[in-house]
């Protein structure tokens, strides 16, 4: 039986608040030793994903002050997500179609984790070696 996003994702995901500064966001990225985290709004809704790459290319390189720029300013557009009970195959297709390496995993309107391409590869590698 095919696994779901919920079964393969990294759970207990931390968020960067939409009103956190980019300095605070970068500190969270460093603390958790990751290159991306979801941006969560005051309404507890997902606003997007912030990555270290985005901080550099969409803010610092443009001369913005990272101690004054809010993380929410980088979370534009509708976030690309996957449902918690969607298959890993659907998640991989979504990642490929949208050229993203991580997908926030949503159960209803709640963020329950993040599925990273490495989670999918690890699952596929484990699954193929157990045959």
Image: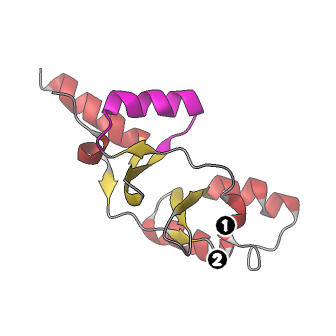
Q: Is residue 62 left or right of residue 87?
A: right
Query: Can you give x and y, in whole percent of width and height, for residue 42 in the image?
Result: 56, 75
Looking at this rendering, what residue extends furthest in the right direction? 63
Q: Which residues are magenta?
A: 85-102
Determine if the magenta segment contains residue 79. no
In the displayed structure, 83 sits above or below 74; it is: above
Q: Which residue is labeled 1 in the image?
A: 72
Task: State the mark number for residue 18.
Answer: none
Residue at the location (60% across, 69% down)? 26
Q: Is residue 12 left or right of residue 64?
A: left
SS state under label 1: helix
Label 2 Cα neighbours within 10 Å, binned few <14 / some 14-19 / many ≥20: some
In the displayed structure, 67 sits above or below 120; it is: below
Label 1 Cα neighbours within 10 Å, binned few <14 / some 14-19 / many ≥20: many
Query: Can you give x and y, in whole percent of width and height, for residue 2 in the image?
Result: 21, 29
Q: Which residue is labeled 2 in the image?
A: 19
SS state under label 2: loop
Q: Is residue 55 left or right of residue 59?
A: left
* Image quadrant occupied by the C terminus: top left
Query: Can you give x and y, in whole percent of width and height, for residue 36 in the image?
Result: 53, 56
| Observer-nearest of 1 and 128 | 1
Q: Are marks 1 and 2 in contact (CB under 8 Å)?
A: yes
Q: Earlier in the sequence, mark 1 or mark 2?
A: 2
Looking at this rendering, what residue extends furthest in the left direction? 131
């Amino acid at each position: 039986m095919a696994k779901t996003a919920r079964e393969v994702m990294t759970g207990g995901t931390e968020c960067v608040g939409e009103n956190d500064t980019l300095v605070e966001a970068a500190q969270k990225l460093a603390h958790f030793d990751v290159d991306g985290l979801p941006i969560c709004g005051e309404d507890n809704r997902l606003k997007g994903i912030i990555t270290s790459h985005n901080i550099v290319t969409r803010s610092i390189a443009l001369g913005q002050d990272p101690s004054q720029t809010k993380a929410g300013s980088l979370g534009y557009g509708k976030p690309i997500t996957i449902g918690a009970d969607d298959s890993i195959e659907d998640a991989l297709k979504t990642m490929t179609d949208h050229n993203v390496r991580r997908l926030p995993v949503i159960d209803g309107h709640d963020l329950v984790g993040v599925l990273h391409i490495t989670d999918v590869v690890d699952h596929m590698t484990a699954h193929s070696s157990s045959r």
